[in-house]
Each structure stands twice: as C-alpha cells, then as structure tokens.
Amino acid sequence: MNKVLLIIQREYVTRVRKKSFIVMTLLVPALFAAMYAVISIIANDKDQTKHTVSVIDNSGIFKGKFQDEKFVKYTYPDKSLLNVKADLKSDDDLVLNIPAKITDTAVLYARKKTTLALADNVQRQMNDIASGISLVKAGIDTARLHRIKSNIIIKSSEITATGEKSTSIGATYALSFAGAILIYMSLFIYGAQVMRGVIEEKTSRIIEVIVSSVKPFQLMMGKIVGVGLVGLTQFVLWIGLSAAISYFVGHNSSTQSPVYVFVHNLGSDAGYEIGCFIFYWIAGFLFYSALFAAVGSAVDSETETQQFMFPITLPLLFTYILSVSYLFQAPDSPLAVWLSIIPLSAPVAMMVRIPFHVPGWQLGLSMVLMVIGFIFTTYVAARIYRVGILMYGKKTSFKELAKWFFYKE
Amino acid sequence: MLSIRNIVKQYAGHRALSDVSLEVKSGDIFGLLGPNGAGKTSLIRIINQITAPDSGEVFFNGEKLNQSHINRIGYLPEERGLYKKMEIGEQMIYLARLKGLSRVEAEKRLKVWFAKLDMESWWKKKIEELSKGMQQKAQFVATVLHEPDLIILDEPFSGFDPVNAEIIKNEILELNRKGATILFSTHRMESVEELCDSIALINKSHKILDGEVKSIRNSYRNATYLVEYNGTQLNFDGTQPFDVIEEKAGSDNDHTIRIKLNDPNTSNDVLQYLIPKTRINMLQEVIPSMNEIFIEQVNLIR
C-alpha cells in the first residue's frame, strides 16, 4: 500500500473516531433542528382564533360595511351596548362601540386584551369606510378612485439568457452570506487541525521515526488530505442529517421545509453553486492548510504560533469582515472583483459573489490562480516544513523561516 | 554493509560533518562515539535519509543509498516519542506498515514480540497511559519489527532502568547474532567495550579515530602495568627496569604499584627484578579503556 495512503488513512481514522468529531457532527444538525423548530413556532404563532366583532353603530354609517375576513367576522346586533356586552360568550368575541359622532373615539371591548393586529384591522376598516363616505360626500366616485389608485407590489426578476426568472433577493443574500461564512470557518477549523497535528508529531518526537520511513512532503500531504477528508465528511454528514431532520419535521408541520425552500431558491443554479462551493472549499483548504502546516513545523507548542498565524489569518479575517459588511451589498464592485481573484481572499470573496452571477472570465481566472496559489503555498510550506519538524527547542523568527526555505535537502 | 564516503554537512553557521568516511562491516556491532554536538546525530540522519549531505556519498550493500533501502533500516532516534493518543498495538502496526510490512504480517510479528517482552496486556493501551520505560520498550519493538538488516540506535540505553537496559541489550545481541548489523551512538563507554566490534570517534565534525575496538585499545598500549605484592614496602632506587607512576598501600601489607616499563624491558624483566625482593600477587598490563582513549582524544583536539 502506498505510504501516503497509509498516512491519509491514519489521519482520517484517528480524527473521525474522536469523541469531539462525533459530538460536533451531531451537535450542528441538532442546533439546526432547534433553530428550525424556533422558526416554525414563530411562523405558526399567528392569531388563528376566530373572532366575532359585534358592531354597535351609533353613527349609522358603518352598518353592514365591515368586510368579514378569514378570522374576523362582523355582526350588527340590534341591542344596546350593555346587553351585547353581557351577552359576550367567548373570550374571543369583541364589541365595537362606534359613537354617534365619528370623530369621537370608538371603543373595542373584549374580555381579554385585544391583539394589536385585530385592533389594527378594525381601525383600518373604519378609516376606509369613513374616508369612502367622505369622498362620496365630496362628490368623488369611489369606483373611479379605486381604478386610479395604484397597487404596487415589487417582485424582482432576473434577466437571463433563457428569459426572465423570478428570484428571491433574500435567498440570494442568505446564500452568499452562508457560503462565505462556511468557507471562512472551515478554513480556520481544519487549518488549525492540520497545524495541531504537526505540532503533536513534533512535540511527541515521533516525527523523526516517521521521516525515517517517508519523505516529509509525503507526511505533510498525507496529513493535509486526511484532515481535508475529515472536513468533507463532516460537511456531508451535516447536510445529510440536517436535510433528514428538516424533511421529517417539515413533513409533520404545515410550513414548508427550509431546505426545500432553500433548494427551490437555488433553482437551476444549484449544481453550479454547490460545485463552486466545493471547489473553493478544497482549493482554499489546500492553500491555507499548507501554510498552517508550515507554522506548526516552526514552533514547539501551540502557544508559540501567534506570531506566525497573524500574517496568515489577516487576509482571511479582512476579507471576511469586508464580506459580511460590504461585499455582498456590492458584489460587482471593483474591490469585490479583485478580492475574488486574488487567491488569498478568493475562497471567501468569491463565495459572496457566486449567487449574484460572476462573469465567466473572472471565475475562470480566479480558479486558475487558486490552483497556482495552492501549488505555490504547498511548495513553500513543504520547504519550511521539512527543516522545521526536526528543529527542537529553538525560538524561530521569520528570518529563520526564510533561511530554511533556501536550505538544500 | 555501510560505506560512508567523504560526507560533508554544513548548517547555517556551523559545520556538522567535515569529510567523514566510515566503513561498517556486515554483522558488526558498530559504535559511533563522540561528545554532544560532535555530529553523530547529523550522520545518523543522513544514513536514514532524513537529511542529505552537502557532498559525499553513502553506499548500502554496495548500492548508492536510495529510497528502496528505507525498509531495510530500523531507526531508534535519541529523541523518542510515539503518538500519545493512539493505542499501542495499532500504532506499532502503523509504523511497521510505513516500513513496508503488510498488516497481517505486522500483527503476527508484534504478537511474538509482545509475548517475548511481557507486553501482551498493553495492546489496547494508549501511549500516554504507559510509563516512560514502557514507552521506550514499545519504541524499541517498533524499530526492529520489520526485521531490518541495519539497526541504527541513537543512545539506546538512555532512559532505561538497569533491568530494562539489560533486556534491551540482550535483544540487540540476539538480533546481531541473527545477522543484523547494529550501528549505535552512545557516550556510555562501558557498553562500547562490552558490545562493540568496531567504533568510530567523532569530535567537532571530524572523525578522529576508527577501527576495531581490540586493535584500537592495543594501539594505545603504553607499557603500563599494575603490580600487587605482599610484604614490606619496597624502596625503588632507580636501578629497577621501570618507572613507578603510582604507589598505593592496602591492608595486611598488600601494596599496589603502577609502573611504566623502560624500553626495551618486558614484563619478564619486571618479574625477574621483583621476585627476589617480595611476593608477587598479581601483574597485569593496563590497556587504556575506551573511556580513557575517548577523553584523551577529545581533549587533544580541544
């Protein structure tokens, strides 16, 4: 069996078997399910009880003019206010007392506190009726008025080669946001895992035994690929478990499953978007984890990593902050375009732009540079790594790292 | 077995090895001696192909050293360690597979070794649960599990208690009897005289001495003898065929003297001179120990 495969296997198996991996893998979909439950509770928490409003119309102009709605019915009993109030049977029934002069305040009586939405409904209807009457009195034909009054609702539509297609702006933003955050976080989480693995081998001194069997480059690549596969496994499990949870939960409730809504909004682009995500995840991971491995090789413990981590994490952090605050509002701005082409920031910045459709040449250029980028960082990192892993108990400076780079075998 | 020719290794700022050449014969136990920082570990790393020399060549059984030889070398580094969180059995198998053994074969051999060294109950234990001595034992097994032709041990006895050191020493000797060539570095001189067939002494990146232990010691003979006699203390007036270096009185009229023969006298002349005067208990030639040669040589350069 190839030695690199053996290393990949070890790195993968020991990590996947860890309790922390299993906990994280289960916890995230569980959180997702909890979040989903909260959302659907909020969504279903509309006032769905039926209300009957008994209208006591002292002015005589509202009678029969209220329109019944799904949950609100209007009746017009010929009784006095006191009698009607005494007749109230249900907690959900109300009495609306309209004074003779409509400029006086109308009062809505109920046994319970009325909801804001209900009071709003009544008030809006009264205003409509009153202003209709005023308009008629002023000699304006209400039917004509309705025709003149515009009724504007915005629906956004995207022009594509195949014609127009309706899009949900919200879903696009969410997608852009989610892609950027996921890539940003996983670069850190799995990059740090690679680094910690390297430090572990160095501090436990097993490194010398291993490099007497394999080339340092093989060990580094084996570790990076192994950890990368762990990351991919975790993502697949997260998506699978989340989808399963939302499918079952979604099945039992009246609202649509968010995954369904999400996929629906991705529309015909789902393949393209997921493909881009996977490409940038892998390329970004290879790009950064090689650097993380080099950092791990240069130090003796995790506490010493700070000074080397800074220049690696800075561009990522910078892009991330820009992404969530600015880029996704202006995905085609020159800044966004440049950030999505430079390999240091491309994995995050390009994910922000993907849902807004990126010109082919920009995407192509970015991807090519990304590949060149990770080959370059892997090469640089490997040269530092092969020296660093055998250096114990020495404080390392950037100058030293540069020296290591130029060492012969 | 191993032929090291004109190795030079330069690190930024200092030279670890300058023009070092060595021959290790097949089946030998070869000691690589030298004070700390002399370049022993650098040389060992070059033989293990962990680093490459700046110039010079290494030949393994007549072939230029290459990747295919990795599986035929077993290496126990001075700085020892294993994956702390990994179960010991699994870890040994992993290390053996990296050396080209199949899983089945590794498991089979490991069981034999574990039984031999009373380690059977450790199989499922994590390294961090073992004592330091146990870890060393496990690491020794990992070094030899793939039955290498050449076993390189960097300070093999450091960290072992005397009992385990003895066990490991016997295992090394047995592996050697079965045909493995052993190369080990040490500064424990008593183990050199006990174990090594040949040695090389490295100091400050230079090889200053090498050869068979016997012939090296013989070449450092300097006609010094130890004589023990019983009787009244002798006075030496200058007519004796030797110089007295040291005199020591023991109990019950026992006296020990350390003498250096004057050319061309032999030990027989000493006896002839002394026998009429006193009763001789012992006469023994003092051959310098490796330790003395080591210190003398290292100080010579300094």
Image: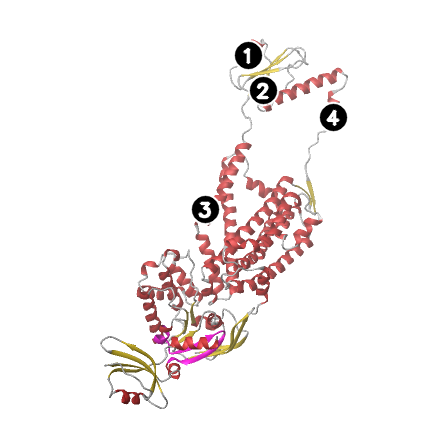
Among the two numbered marks 2 and 1 on one chain, the one whose residue lies closer to the N terminus: 2
Among the two numbered marks 4 and 2 on one chain, the one whose residue lies closer to the N terminus: 2
Label 4 close to label 3 by CB (< 8 Å): no
Among the two numbered marks 3 and 1 on one chain, the one whose residue lies closer to the N terminus: 3
The C terminus of chain A lies in quadrant = bottom right
Pointer 4 residue = A147
Category of crowding for the residue at label 1, using alpha-carbon neighbours closer than 10 angstroms: few (below 14), some (14–19), many (at least 20):
some
| Residue type highlighted by circle 4 | Arg
**Most foreground residue, B293 or B196:** B293
Among the two numbered marks 2 and 3 on one chain, the one whose residue lies closer to the N terminus: 3
**Most foreground residue, A321 or B190:** B190
**Most foreground residue, B189 or B75:** B189
Write down the chain letter for disc 4: A
Pointer 3 residue = A23
B85 above or below A97? below
What's drawn in magenta, residue-wise? B191-213
Label 3 close to label 1 by CB (< 8 Å): no
